[in-house]
Image: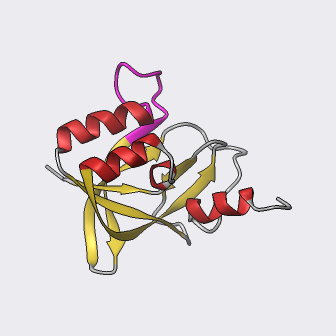
Amino acid sequence: MIDLLFVYGTLIQPGNPIAGYLNLNCTYLLRGKIKGILYDIGEYPGLIISDNAQNYVYGHIYKLHHTKQNLFVIDDYEGVGPDQEQPNLYIRKIRSVETADGIVDTWIYLYNLPVDGLPLITSGNYAEFTAQKKSPGN
């Protein structure tokens, strides 16, 4: 079973409880990127994978220590599963992510609802985007 997870949004933000869970129950490995389109959903981002995308979405790769348990906790947070609101907000898939050390297969949460009219995060970097939103004058 794949034991790597690529995160690109709220799961890398300081103060997020599930980001804290990742730091306690997983090991940060390195940064990665994947071709796709990142949308601003409001309180969080949504990633749509597109091989035709001209841009990358940037994030972090973690090694899961207890893969099934870790994914169960994160699935619940991301609204994934049959007991969650349908259709699920996200779907969890295995995708190849580019790193400085080569390409690795990771679990990733992809946005699963329509994106029509949602603003793009053109940098593909959610942490950078939220820092700019919080800076004075924005």
Q: Decide which of 99, 26 is in the foreground and name it.
A: 26
Q: Is residue 34 above or below residue 44?
A: below
Q: How many marks?
A: 0
Left or right of 116? Residue 104 is left
Q: Is residue 59 above or below residue 7?
A: below
Give how far across and how far down residue 24 sits, in percent: 29, 49
Q: Decide which of 51, 4 is in the foreground and name it.
A: 4
Asked whether residue 45 is in view, the answer is: yes
Q: How is the image coloured?
A: secondary structure
Split into 4 quadrants, where in the image is the C terminus?
bottom right
Left or right of 51? Residue 96 is left
Which residue is outermost to the top? 83
For image coordinates 73% across by 56% down, the residue present is 134
Give how far across and how far down residue 135 sits, in percent: 76, 62
Give how far across and how far down residue 72 sits, in percent: 27, 34
Which residue is outermost to the left? 1
For image coordinates 25% across by 67% down, the residue present is 104
Query: Does the stretch in magenta take in 2?
Result: no
Give how far across and how far down residue 79 sits, in percent: 43, 31
For image coordinates 65% across by 57% down, the residue present is 130
For image coordinates 18% across by 53% down, the residue present is 2
Which residue is outermost to the right? 137
Q: Decide which of 112, 43 is in the foreground and name it.
A: 43
Q: Which residues are magenta?
A: 79-91
Asked whether residue 121 is in view, the answer is: no
Left or right of 46? Residue 70 is left
* Quadrant of the image occupied by residue 54: bottom right
Query: Does the stretch in magenta take in 89?
Result: yes
Q: Is residue 36 above or below residue 54?
A: above
Main secondary structure found in the magenta portion: loop
Which residue is outermost to the bottom? 100
